[in-house]
Image (cartoon, rainbow, N blue to C red):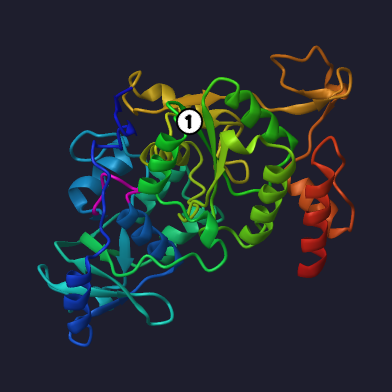
Amino acid sequence: MTLINDGIAPHGGTLIDRLVSEEQKAEFLSKADFLPQVTLDDRALSDLVMIAIGGFSPLNGFMGQADYEPVVTDMRLASGLPWAVPVTLSVSEAVAAPLKEGMLVRLNDKTGRYVGVLELTEKYTYDKQKEAVNVYRTGEDKHPGVKVIYEQGPVNLAGPVWLLERDPHPLFPNYQIDPAASRAMFRERGWKTVVGFQTRNPIHRAHEYIQKCALETVDGLFLHPLVGATKKDDIPADVRMRCYEIMMDRYFPQDRVILAINPSAMRYAGPREAIFHALIRKNYGCTHFIVGRDHAGVGDYYGTYDAQHIFDQFEPGELGITPMKFEHAFYCTRTGTMATSKTSPSTKEERIHLSGTKVREMLRRGELPPPEFSRPEVAAELSRAMQVQS
């Protein structure tokens, strides 16, 4: 692992910054009415932001074919640097047809607001099924990530991007801590080792257990829940963040934990996304990354610990961030504590497991998850939110 005076080195060695200067912004705005336009969906908009703030370093734009192909097949960029998930801007043939390489392209959000610029260096077609099977390990469109691939356009636009404005997050402005800022916070606190935690689900006792186990061995914990686009049946980001605020107030040492939002979108790519998430946290300055059971999984597409095994496909130290692998945690009725099969002598009947799916079903019925699964204050917050939704 390479450490520099600003902490762990970003992936590729340099933290990318594609936020425009005031001079560049004025120039791009002056051309606003003359540039060809492309509308970004929620995921592409998240990707634009993550590229611009350095979360996807070393990417400085949407991938060209030379990077896209080896990422799909071998989890590497053209340079040989590990990278597990394609980051592409896919459009229809009708949108792509008038665009010429060398053009500047105006990027709009779904409301038509001018948010960024793409310097178009390449247009290329791609094999959707090949991407699905390699990245998601299935060609079934029931998989939410595969469904996105099949529904998006057949032409990828590639090239460097610029973000015109880094707007405060509409829901969580106080938790919008970008990579340069998180690195500065770690440095100010004197943290040499920091473990990152990724989640798209509300925090429960198993999460808390592995987070605190990890915190025993490092200087700080970076709680980094994802607030970009997720599946419709996932718990909304505002509810999840309120649950984390409760935990921060009552159950975590605040001088050793930082709560921030991850603005990227979920891919549900299981093992590959575990690598992707680890590299993102490396860019935020984390030296370690928690990988639990079925990381970024969905349905039955991935084995229970496939997201841990995939790290073994890389040479020691090659990723530049250390995975911390945890067994599936449960509440042990014999010992009266959270535990895993590594630490508990209990039988199967003495272990309380609750999945996120089962908890959502309980909440819809108006039932509170038991304290063995969730802190009571968190369970109450989830119940209130679920009743409002229904």
Which quadrant does the C terminus fall into? bottom right
Front residue of 339 and 96 = 339
Residue under label 1: 194
SS for dot 1: strand
Which quadrant does the N terminus fall into? top left
Q: Residue at x 83, y 53 (%)?
A: 380
The magenta-colored residue range is 54-60
Front residue of 312 and 336 = 336
* Residue 157 in view in this figure: no
Q: Can you give x and y, in whole percent of width and height, for residue 344 in the image? A: 77, 15
Q: Can you give x and y, in whole percent of width and height, for residue 261 in the image? A: 52, 52
Front residue of 386 and 3 = 3
Query: In the rendered structure, which amino acid carries the disc numbered 1?
Result: Val
Labels in figure, total: 1
Q: Can you give x and y, in whole percent of width and height, for residue 211 in the image? A: 62, 31
Q: Can you give x and y, in whole percent of width and height, for residue 223 in the image? A: 56, 41
Q: Is residue 97 left or right of residue 111?
A: left
Task: Let me know if residue 56 is in the magenta part.
Answer: yes
As displayed, is residue 187 above or below residue 120? above
